[in-house]
Amino acid sequence: MWTWSLNWGDITPHIVIGTCPMTPDDVVRISEKTGASALFSLQHDDCLAYWQIDDDTMRRTAEEINVVMARCPIRDFDIADMRKNLPGAISTLTRLITAGHRTYVHCTAGLGRAPLTVLGYLILIEKHPKQAAIRLLMNGRPGAMPAWEAFYGACYDLEAQYRKSIIKRAYALYVSKVNNDPLLDWKQAKSDIFKSELTALGCQPPKNTPIDFTQ
């Protein structure tokens, strides 16, 4: 049976994955020990209730020490909910990093939802090849178990949602003969449109940040 302890691992210079803070003191410790200026939670309300985490008190503590807190709730062990909410989570992480934050990403154990979000960011935003992204993830968080079904499902949904934009971009690549291969044109078009749309999408604006995530 899993037992909580506060632990984490560096993934990139801008991303840390770890377990959830349970108390205001944990928020302070994370900030001091990891250098994170933002805490990004994937915990659902059910998680907060089960672990008796007072989110409002945690946020007040974060505000006192100038740490941004953001949250995109995703249900634990729920592939459909992960698939549905992954794009918004990736988008919010993107905005935090773009704003210059070293970001501590967590779910409860820091093994499922948080690694899934970071993996999505590395592949769809930073455009790391899948195997390179996996190596980064596993080097920093060896026990990570991201749900690939949710990742591929979210990509399928994004392709369906933005198909017209992808077709337009693929045609532009084809005409300009960038790749000289229609299949590569389509693959690059998907990558370009996914990154563009995810960067603009957003999830939930942090309550205690000067960054305007609604624009």
Image (tube, helix red, strand yellow):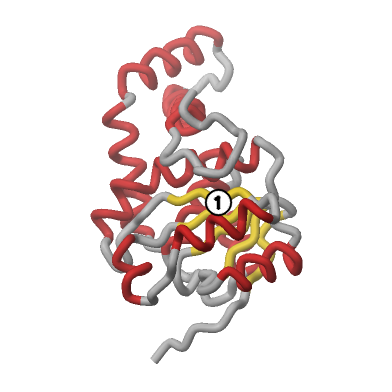
Q: Is residue 82 left or right of residue 197?
A: left
Query: Residue 17's quadrant in the figure?
Result: bottom right
In this view, the residue in front, 59 or 129, is 59
Residue 188 in sight in this render: no
Residue 29 in sight in this render: yes
Q: Which residue sits at x=74%, y=54%?
A: 13
Q: Give the residue type that dot 1 points to.
A: Met
Which residue is disc 1 drawn over?
A: 69
Residue 111 lies, in percent from the top left, at 48, 71
Residue 166 lies, in percent from the top left, at 39, 21
In this view, the residue in front, 204 or 125, is 204
Q: Which residue sits at x=47%, y=53%?
A: 117
Residue 15 lies, in percent from the top left, at 65, 55
Mark 1 lies on a secondary structure that is strand
Q: Which residue sits at x=38%, y=75%?
A: 52
- Crowding around mark 1 (Cα neighbors within 10 Å: few <14, some 14 to 19, many 20+) is many
Q: Which residue sits at x=51%, y=32%?
A: 213
